[in-house]
Image (spheres, rainbow, N blue to C red):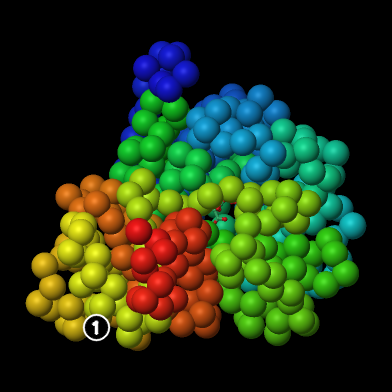
Amino acid sequence: MSTDGSISMETEVVKLDPLNPNPAIIKKAAEIIRSGGLVAFPTETVYGLGANAYDPQAALRIFKAKGRPTDNPLIVHIAEKEQLFQVAQEIPETALEVAEILWPGPLTLILKKTERVPYETTGKLDTVAVRMPAHPVALQLIKESGVPIAAPSANRSGRPSPTSASHVVEDLQGEVEMILDAGDTFFGLESTVIDLTKEKPILYRPGPLAPEDLERYLGPVLVPEVARGTAYAEKAMAPGMKYKHYAPTKRLILVEKKGDLPEVVRRLSLKYKVAVLCSTEMLRILENEAVCRIQLGSESNLYEIAKNLFAAFRALDHSYCDIGVMQSFPERGIGLAIMNRARKASGMSIIANPQDMINLF
Ligand code: TXA
Ligand code: MG
């Protein structure tokens, strides 16, 4: 039974080669999409929960399966450049240029929508989020379906995004017809979302492509507080950003200054069973602490930290600990996206100074 008491469906989980997917499996998945069903599939960022972007009923099924508020719009995934003109109009020249260079890739552009895209897909907005994912399975599925695929991340709303098929099974078993399992996703964090409908480009969600990467093509990009994860957005700005996101079920504390981590861990250990989410370098410093260790990777490679982040949030929930403490990382490159996700996952439980901890507990 699902949460609303209805009988849940049978979910078929199918393994396939990420670089050379079996065409028969892709064909079967595409038939499900065309007939209004749901297929979870890998992209280079995270797994997506896909449906025909032109079918309002199918889009509504996505919201239901995720438990997602219907005013939080979906990203429309395309596989060919011509499809951009089917879903978006009045496309600025800069958008075409940036798409030419950075697609397929982890970049989502907000543009004015065409009539073909129903309001169910865009959360009643006149704009549409579009991206061309750089994953063979995603591209072949879209091509074979013959329609653009609307897909949010394939997690229950508010939970960390899935970076492996097992995360999708954990959250959506019985809610979708098929899950395509092609192993771990590459970046592990969702795409960079940028609005190109305003006078100047605005970054809504940082991702694998940093603002400095985009500025080379787009000129100055506005980076509002919501993009850093230090504030929640008003609906008018970026609908999805007002909701709590990416959160483990257990409490997560973010320590602003790396050097404060050992002291914060020591203090919390007096009262709680603590799990530490940190770099391999930091683990060496914490060698003698009696804590649960959840490794994020080396500080010298922020891509590795990004790739492991959401699995680490899930590992915290599966651990015997009551509370997680996470280290901060520099906000350059993909680090901006790491810190955005970490701040939101902590629900703004951020320790700027160990002396202030008294206010948090
Ligand atoms: O990497 C990704 O982007 C993944 C994979 C599956 O492609 N998808 C993903 O989708 O992260 P989702 O729905 O979890 O996040 C999309 C974000 C949401 O915060 C949503 O509010 C925002 O993009 N968004 C979508 N359409 C929008 C629009 N028209 N205006 C402003 N924000 C929009
Ligand atoms: Mg999401």
Q: Position of residue 12 (x, y in %)?
A: 36, 30
Above or below: residue 8 compared with residue 147: above
Tell me the quarter of the image containing the C terminus: bottom left
Above or below: residue 182 compared with residue 149: below
Q: Position of residue 83 (x, y in %)?
A: 73, 50
Front-most of 136 and 303?
Answer: 303
Q: How many marks?
A: 1
Residue 93 lies in quadrant: bottom right
Is residue 290 at all visible to an observer of this figure? Answer: yes
Q: Residue at x 44, y 46 (%)?
A: 159
Locate residue 55 relative to residue 173 in the image: left or right: right
Locate residue 211 relative to residue 284 in the image: left or right: right
Label 1 neighbour load within 10 Å: few <14, some 14-19, many 20+:
few
| Residue that sits furthest to the front in the current view | 358
Q: Position of residue 24 (x, y in %)?
A: 42, 37
Q: Position of residue 139 (x, y in %)?
A: 55, 52
Front-most of 253 and 186?
Answer: 253
Q: Residue at x 38, y 37 (%)?
A: 171
Q: Residue at x 31, y 65 (%)?
A: 325
Locate residue 361 relative to residue 273 in the image: left or right: right
Front-most of 228 and 214?
Answer: 228
Q: Residue at x 73, y 49 (%)?
A: 235
Above or below: residue 4 compared with residue 264: above
Q: Identify the element where label 1 is drawn.
A: helix
Tell me the quarter of the image containing the N terminus: top left
Residue 356 lies in quadrant: bottom left
Does label 1 point to a residue whose CB lies under 8 Å from ligand 1?
A: no
* Residue type marked 1: Glu
Is residue 136 at all visible to an observer of this figure? Answer: no
Residue bearing mark 1: 281
